[in-house]
Image (cartoon, grey):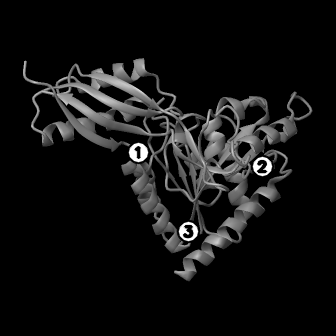
Amino acid sequence: MGRVNLIQVKEGILEENTRQAGAIRDRLRRRGTFLLNLMSSPGAGKTSLILETVRALAGSWRMGVIEADIDSSLDAERVAEAGVRATQLGTGGLCHLDASMVAQGLSALGEEDLDLIILENVGNLVCPAEFDTGAHTSAMILSLPEGEDKPRKYPLMFSTSQALVINKTDYMALEEFDIEAVRESVRKLNPDMGVFPLSCRSGEGLADWTGWLERCLREQNRAGSAE
Amino acid sequence: MHELSVMQGILEVVLRHAANNGVSGVEAVNLQVGSLSHLREEWMQKYFHHLAAGTVAEGAVLRVQRVPAVICCRECGRKYEWQARTGPSCPSCASERGDLVSGREYTVASLEAV
């Protein structure tokens, strides 16, 4: 046996992803394009929220969608039917998107002439929170049937998102769900988080969400034209 | 969960430094993992073992040191440890606003190699 040497390395594996994510963010900002990373558990309503959002904003903004559902183009087809440019990323069972996958999605979609690109992340409340996608803002959805304890169970997800959509408020009559308790635990975890209770089914509350998103888009447009 | 992609990233760093230093075998990898990571040490070792088969890092032991989640207060600049059960709250000024300065990392600190 030879002598064992200690080799100092001090190299992280997230740095390269963070660097790539920063490059995506800067490039899109210069174009005036806003990239929104949308995360939630499976079934919370990511695709429904995207469909309702693009329907509401289609007259005013140019939009594209990058879908990352696991090995299925069903969501991308539904979005394309709504008249929006869409591409499907084959994530092959991966549990999250990282910046290199987002870069692939952007080149497949074509990032020219868009005001808003929505990234539908993989349905999962754990892994997507750990990786910077290059988005300007991350939003997450909590749907009523999932229960109000989620901020305590998934603190990283609730800490790294800037907006929380509480979807399926039309279930309120059926479910025991204390929306004020969610607001309180979110306020303790992430005081700057915007909270938007809504129902994609009835349309109630959607205007608050799209209004917030449009303010983000106007700001990004100004930042892009100021370059 | 993303054990496989994280461990693949770690193995790439290990192999690059092993090659740069001309080592013939890596015996141990000293890793620093943020306390906010959900990855368990036992599973990290299993995935690493699987991925490293046939490389100079085959059979290497992972030694995982957890790095506490630390928040830097936006109001007074104090750095304090965050347990992530409730939101940040500065022990000096009670501000709930702060930025995470550590706790999410996966860093290869050093290699023990022959």
Label 3 lies in what chain? A
Question: At 49% across and 39% down in the image, what residue appears?
Answer: B104
Question: x%, y% of residue B100?
Answer: 56, 46
Discs 1/2, front: 1
Q: Nearer the viewer, residue A26 or A56?
A: A26
Question: x%, y% of residue B103?
Answer: 51, 38
Query: Total of numbered circles in the picture?
Result: 3
Q: Nearer the viewer, residue A69 or A11?
A: A11
Q: Between marks 3 and 2, how big is the CA–CA gap?
A: 23 Å
Question: At 43% across and 57% down in the image, what residue appears?
Answer: A108
Read off the residue under disc 3.
A33
Instruction: Say which label, 3 or 2, has the lower sequence index.
Output: 3
Secondary element at tag 2:
strand
- Same chain? Circles 3 and 1: yes
Q: Between marks 1 and 2, how big is the CA–CA gap?
A: 29 Å
Instruction: Say which label, 3 or 1, has the lower sequence index.
Output: 1
> Where is residue A60, by image quadrant?
bottom right
Read off the residue under disc 2.
A195
Label 1 lies in what chain? A
Question: At 42% across and 49% down in the image, what residue appears?
Answer: A101
Question: x%, y% of residue A92?
Answer: 42, 36
Q: Give the residue type at disc 2.
A: Val
Q: Give the residue type at disc 3.
A: Thr
> Where is residue B113, by image quadrant?
top left
- Estimate how packed mark 2 is, as few (under 14), some (14 to 19) or many (20 or more) residues with alpha carbons within 10 Å: many
Mark on residue B102?
none
Image position of A195 with respect to B40: above or below: below
Q: Residue furthest bottom?
A: A226
Secondary element at tag 3:
loop
Question: At 28% across and 28% down in the image, what residue appears?
Answer: B29
B55 with respect to B5 (left or right): left
Q: Between marks 3 and 1, how big is the CA–CA gap?
A: 25 Å
